[in-house]
Image: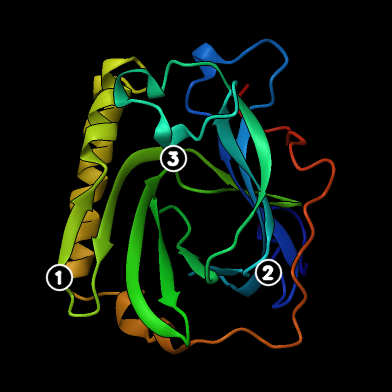
Amino acid sequence: MTGTGECARWAPGDQILWRYRDNGRAHRAPGAPPVHICRPVTVVQDTAELLAVWMAPGTECVRPVLANGTQVHAEPLATRYTAPRTTARSTWFGTGVLKLARPGDPWSVWLFWDRGWLFRNWYVNLEEPHLRWSGGVDSEDHFLDISVNPDRSWKWLDEDEFAQAQHVGLMDRETAAGVREAGRAAVEVITGWGSPFRDGWEHWRPDPRWQVPPLPDDWDRTPAHMPS
């Protein structure tokens, strides 16, 4: 990392953590960590305009699961966000994911490829603007997403989960309205083919010398500024 304080920047090749806080803080068991998703990534670029990171195939990550070990998305929607949860370690077996986040934006843009580097799509993950700390960046997912195809067509994703999160009290009406507004702003960027869609990231490739970042034992350590 270069610089100090809030202006600190990571160098290409640095390994950091890309994390998400648990949305269901009201349902969290006593003593449970506030972080429920952690993905070790390698920094591609870190400037005042953009943080780009690479999550390599084979990366060991942390993901939420139900307390009985069931996959979250295997649980019926009606109880998906109220059933007790825990976290589990798992390996990212798919192709790698390039993640792009502009400071202050309430979304990040992910790029997916099929085998052989055949570009599949962009994925707009609506979320809290990222908070930087010495070990990485933290956010909170907002359930609603957007898929963008190579032909520039797009569609909303997970609107049922977005509605259910509001229904069970994980998101109040004011926050939900802000998320929908952020989604409309993202759609304006898509339809105008603004950055990062126009910037050619689909042709980017990782440095072959990069090693897969390890998942540290203290992956859930809490920065001082993280909400409890």
Residue 107 in picture, x, y percent from top left: 38, 52
State whether residue 172 appears in this view: yes
The residue that label 3 is drawn on is 141
Q: In this image, 181 relative to 53: left or right? A: left
Along the viewing direction, whichever of 204 and 161 lies nearer the viewer: 161
How many residues crowd mark 3 within 10 Å: few (<14), some (14–19), many (20+)?
some
Q: Is residue 38 above or below residue 70?
A: below
Q: Are marks 2 and 1 in contact (CB under 8 Å)?
A: no
User: Could you give the CA–CA distance between mark 2 and mark 1, rounded to whole angstroms?
Assistant: 29 Å
User: Could you give the CA–CA distance between mark 2 and mark 3, rounded to whole angstroms?
Assistant: 21 Å
Q: Indicate the amino acid at tag 1.
A: Ser
Mark nearer the N terminus (2 vs 3): 2
Colour scheme of the picture? rainbow
State whether residue 48 appears in this view: no
Secondary structure found at label 3: strand
Identify which residue is drawn at 77% across, 75% down: 211
How many residues crowd mark 2 within 10 Å: few (<14), some (14–19), many (20+)?
many
Identify which residue is drawn at 67% across, 37% down: 88
Q: Indicate the amino acid at tag 2.
A: Thr
Q: In this image, 215 relative to 93: left or right? A: right
Secondary structure found at label 2: strand
Q: In this image, 193 relative to 64: left or right? A: left
Mark nearer the N terminus (3 vs 1): 3
The residue that label 2 is drawn on is 42
The residue that label 1 is drawn on is 153
Secondary structure found at label 1: loop
Residue 7's disc is none
Q: Indicate the amino acid at tag 3.
A: Asp
User: Could you give the CA–CA distance between mark 3 and mark 1, rounded to whole angstroms?
Assistant: 23 Å
Mark nearer the N terminus (2 vs 1): 2
